[in-house]
Amino acid sequence: MPQADAAAELNNLAPIPMECDAPFLKIEGELPRELNGTLYRNGPNPQFDVPGAHWFVGDGMLHAFHLENGRASYRNRWVRTPKWQAEHDAGRAIFAGFGPIKLRDAPQTSCNDSGVANTNIISHGGRLLALEEGHLPTEIDPTTLATRGYYNYDGRIAGPFTAHPKVDPATGEMMFFGYNAKGPFSSALSYGVVDSGGRVSRFEHFDTPYSSMVHDFIVTANHVLFPILPLTGSMERAMKGQPAYAWEPAKGGYVGVMPRNGKTSEIRWFRADACYVFHVLNAWDDGSRIVADVMQYEEAPLFPLPDGGRTDPAKSRARLCRWTFDLDANTDQFSRVYLDDVTGEFPRVDERRAGLATTHGWYACANPDLAASTALHGIVHVDGQGARKAQYMLPRGDSISEPVFVERGADAAEGDGWLLAVVWRARENRSDLAVFNAQDIGSGPVALVKLGHRVPDGFHGNWVGAA
C-alpha cells in the first residue's frame, strides 16, 4: 500500500478538540422521510494526549445525528466520567492506561476511577446508556447528550458491564455480562438479565478457565455462550510495567455454553485452538446445534505478546467465520469454518432477528485491492450462509464506520430498510453520514449528510427511532 494511503488511514484516529452543535446540515441526495430518529455513535476521543496510550482507553465522545422529515442536525459531547472531570479540573492527563494506574507525575487527586464510557451507546428500558466494558453503564440525556452519571439499576448490579449487551427481539429483555468481575484481571465473569421495563431479574458470578478480555458474547433464543479466548490479563505483568493484556495462544480457546433459563453451574465448556473474536454477527439454534457467525482473527490484533513482541500482522485480521456446536455429540470440540476471505469488522444484522436465523447481514470491510490494509474502506452484504450478495467500496483513502441497520417500518420484511454509516473523507479531512438502501448497497449512498469537521474512527452506535 502506498505510504500516503497508510498515513491517511492513521490520521482519523486523532481526537477532535471541540464539542459543537450543527442544527442544519447540508444533504446531498434525499433523506428517506421514514428515517425519523437519532443515530448515536461512541468512540475514543482523548481529552489530553498520553504518549503511547492504547486507543481503547481514550475518553468517550458521543456523536448524535438527528434525522427528521428529510432534515439532519448533529451534536457531539464528551462523556463526563469521573476520570474526564478529574483530568479536566487538573488541566492534564492523570491516568496511564488500563485500570486505575496513574501517571508517575500525575497531580494529586482523589479520583481512582479510570472509566471512559467510550465503546457503545444503547437505549433500553427508557434509558440511554454509554458503555465501556470495564465499568458500569453511564446514563446520557438523549437530547442534550449531558452525562447523568453511572447507572446501577437501583443497586441491583455492580462491577464491569459489557459494551455488547443483547436484547431479545421477542421479550425485550437485555442480557449482559462483565469480565474482571471479582477485581482487575480476575478470571470471574458476571451474568445478568434486565427485563423490558428496565428491572434486573438476574445477576450472578461464575469462574472461567483464565483471565481474558471478553469483548462480546453470543445469545440465541435458547442459549448463552461465553468465549474465553487467549487475549489474557495479568496483574503481575501490569505491576512490572509489562503488557497488562497480551496474546497467549498456548492457553487455547474455550467457549462456555449455558441454557438461557439454566444456571451458570450448568455451563458446558467447549475447546478450540487459539483464535480471537471481538464481534459477533449473529447466532441461532438449529435443532441440537448452535450456529454462530463471528469475525474471527487467527491472532488478536492491537495487543502484543507477553514479552512485548509483536503478533503476526498477516494473522491479525478478521474474517467472517461460522462456529457450530453440536450439543448431542460426545465431544468438547466445535467446528470453525471461514465463510469469506475479505478482511472485515463491525458486523450487524436486522436486530429484529437477533438470536434467530437470518438471511441478511452487513459488515465494514477492507479493500481487497489493498492487500496490506486493515483499514475499513467499504461494506459487505451477506446472506444467511455468509455468501456475499453485494459490496460497496469508497474512494481510495476514505474509511467507513460500523454500518447500523434501520428497518423501513415495524412490519417491514427482514433487511428492508437502510444502513447508516459515518464516512471519513480523507482528502477533505471531514466526515459524512452515508445512508444506503440496505438491500442495494452496491449502488452507493442514497443520501449523504455533510459535516464540516471529521468524526474520528470510533467503535459502535445505534439508532433510536422517534417516539
Image (cartoon, helix red, strand yellow):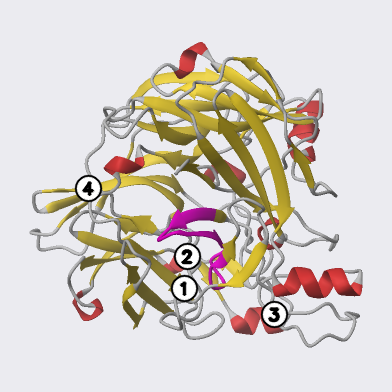
> Of callouts 2 and 1, which one flags the residue occurring earlier in the amino acid sequence?
2
Q: Where's the N terminus, which quadrant? A: top right
Pointers 2 and 3 in contact (CB under 8 A)?
no
* Residue 63 image offset from top left, x and y in percent: 66, 45
> Of callouts 4 and 2, which one flags the residue occurring earlier in the amino acid sequence?
2
Residue matched to label 2:
162
Amino acid marked by disc 1? Tyr
The residue shown at (55%, 40%) is: 38
**Along the line of sight, the residue nearer the viewer: 235 or 183:** 183
Instruction: Sort mark 4 into few (<14), some (14-19) or many (20+) by Cα contacts within 10 Å.
Output: many
Residue matched to label 4:
284
Pointers 4 and 2 in contact (CB under 8 A)?
no
- Rounded to the nearest angstrom, the CA distance separating label 2 from label 3 is 18 Å
> Of callouts 4 and 3, which one flags the residue occurring earlier in the amino acid sequence?
3
* Residue 331 image offset from top left, x and y in percent: 15, 63
Residue 179 badge: 1
Residue matched to label 3:
100
